[in-house]
Image: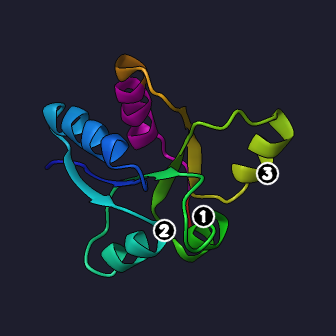
Amino acid sequence: MKKKILVVDDEPDNRTTAKALLEKEGYSVTTAISGDDCLEKLKKEKPDLILMDIMMPGTPVRQVVEKIKNIKIAYLSVVRTSEAEKEELLSPKNIVGFIQKPFDITELLAQVKNFLKQDKEIK
């Protein structure tokens, strides 16, 4: 069965690129344009992984993440973060990692595969 991924980014190019790359690898991909849109889509479907931009308009991403339970989330970030900031951002149990933007295609695909394999307890 195909793994489902939800790509949440306010930049159309990032959504389109990530969706095309991940679908080519055999994943089922849905996109959302904001954290609020993400929460709406989660009412209808449960992806195996959410790739979420850290900086988006609307409800702050930290508040959106607090509302998401039992789904792995990896942040997409163009912002360079310190180790202390990363540690704080990674503290929620369902956050599995960071993917730096602009992403390297090979690295993106390898990280997604790795995140999906992780058996991190996400309750």
Residue 22's quadrant in the figure?
top left
> Which image quadrant is residue 123 in?
bottom right
In the rendered image, residue 114 lying in the magenta stretch gets the answer yes
- Give the Cα distance between marks 3 and 2: 19 Å
For label 3, the SS is helix
Dot 3 amino acid type: Glu
Q: Which mark is residue 15?
A: none
Task: Determine whether, in the image, residue 64 is placed left or right of residue 28.
Answer: right
Q: Position of residue 115 (x, y in %)?
A: 45, 39
Q: Amino acid at mark 1?
A: Val
The local crowd at label 3, few if under 14, some if 14 to 19, many if 20 or more residues have their Cα within 10 Å, is few
On screen, residue 41 versus residue 101, left or right, reads: left
In the rendered image of this protein, does residue 79 appear above or below residue 61?
Answer: above
Q: Position of residue 82 (x, y in %)?
A: 81, 34
Q: Residue at x 51, y 71 (%)?
A: 68
Name the main secondary structure of what is drawn in magenta: helix
Q: Height in image: 117 above or below 105?
A: below
User: What numbered label is drawn on residue 61?
Assistant: 1
Residue 44: horizontal and vertical position, in percent?
26, 79
The answer to which of marks 2 and 1 sits earlier in the sequence is 2
Q: Label 3 to label 1, Cα distance in Å?
A: 13 Å
**Type of the residue with mark 2:** Gly
Residue 88: mark: 3
Q: Which residue is mark 2?
A: 35
Give the extent of the magenta segment: 108-121
